Image (tube, rainbow, N blue to C red):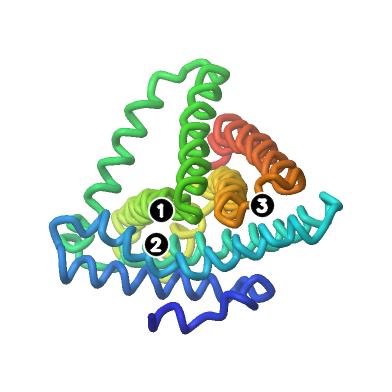
Amino acid sequence: MVLESLFNPFVIKKRPWEIFMAGFLYSIVGLLLSYLVFREIAGILMVFLIVMATIPILYTTIKNEEELDLKYDQEWVLLKEHTKVLIFLMFLFLGITFALVLSYVFLPEAMVHSIFFLQEKAILNVNNNVQGGAVQFNFFVKIFINNLKVLFFCLIFSLLYGTGSIFILTWNASVIATAMGNLIKLELSKTASLVGFASISSYFSAATFSFFRYMTHGLLEIAAYFVAGLAGGIISIALIKHNLQNNRVLADALDLILISLGILIVAAWVEVYITPRFFM
């Protein structure tokens, strides 16, 4: 397909900034097509179109990682290679998020509501679920359990579909972009009410505040989801290729799952104890 041919999956791990542009382009195209073709379900269709565009690159990448399990015996070498993939996946996530934040902020209000209605509803449900966490430790446990559910589904989706976790992660990117875009608009409205207009510096200030408000812990959460998704994808491809009897594959996947759990604990701690101190 045309979008797939624009980026070379065999060299993109060495040039992760290209996947940022890929995520940005896929998101803009998916958003516009979903709104023009099926406006009533634009929010979820946009996610599917973005996922469809990313699958060829992701499948090739995960397939190569599974082959590395059979090539190398030293775990630190494998983890070094997986780190390159994680960086490239994070750039993909940031590209998708950046495109959707810009769309949320600058598109007409009616169009934004039509496209991001499901995402806004999801944010409202999350806020209702985490309210009442007056005791920080209880709030920490609640946040961690919610994130653990997402990680579990990333693992299962990747196990069943190979690259299935990208659907959950793209959906999360659209929800985070909605939250960030809404915060940017809120900060700009505050500035406009005080100054009378929204200057370029106001846009920059609002965007910076919004980015760090959600990404201080959000990047850690997404990294954990990607690591779990990579583990599930490696197991899935190993099953297809009948390589699962190799203990190296299973050991590597287990290490990735344990690492993802560790990252998720840190992410929940940052969200509960660090982010509120600076961005509330």
Give the residue pinned by disc 1. 167
Amino acid tagged 3: Asn
Task: Kindly indicate whether the residue at mark 3 contacts the one at mark 2 (C-beta within 8 angstroms).
Answer: no
Residue in view at x 24 percent, y 71 percent: 33
Tell me if residue 253 comes above or below residue 178 in the rendering: above
Q: Residue at label 2?
A: 51
* Residue 53 seen in render: yes
At 30% across and 33% down in the image, what residue appears?
125
- Could you say where residue 68 lies in the image, as x and y percent from the top left? 73, 61
Q: How far apart are marks 2 and 1 (CA)?
A: 6 Å
Q: In this view, does 234 lie to the left or right of 167?
A: right
Q: Residues within 10 Å of mark 3 (few under 14, many from 20)?
A: some
Residue 178 locus on image (x, y percent): 35, 52
What residue sits 26% from the left and 59% below the top? Answer: 45
| Above/below status of 35 relative to 237 | below
Calculate the distance from the C-alpha at mark 3 to the C-alpha at mark 1: 26 Å
Q: Which of 120 and 146 is in front in this view?
A: 146
Q: Which of marks 3 and 1 is nearer the N terminus?
A: 1
Image quadrant for the N terminus? bottom left
Dot label at residue 98: none
Q: Do the residues labelled 2 and 1 touch (CB within 8 Å)?
A: yes
Q: How far apart are marks 2 and 3 (CA)?
A: 27 Å
Amino acid, disc 2? Val
The disc label shown at residue 243, or none: 3
Q: In the rendered view, does 8 fall on the left or right side of 26?
A: right
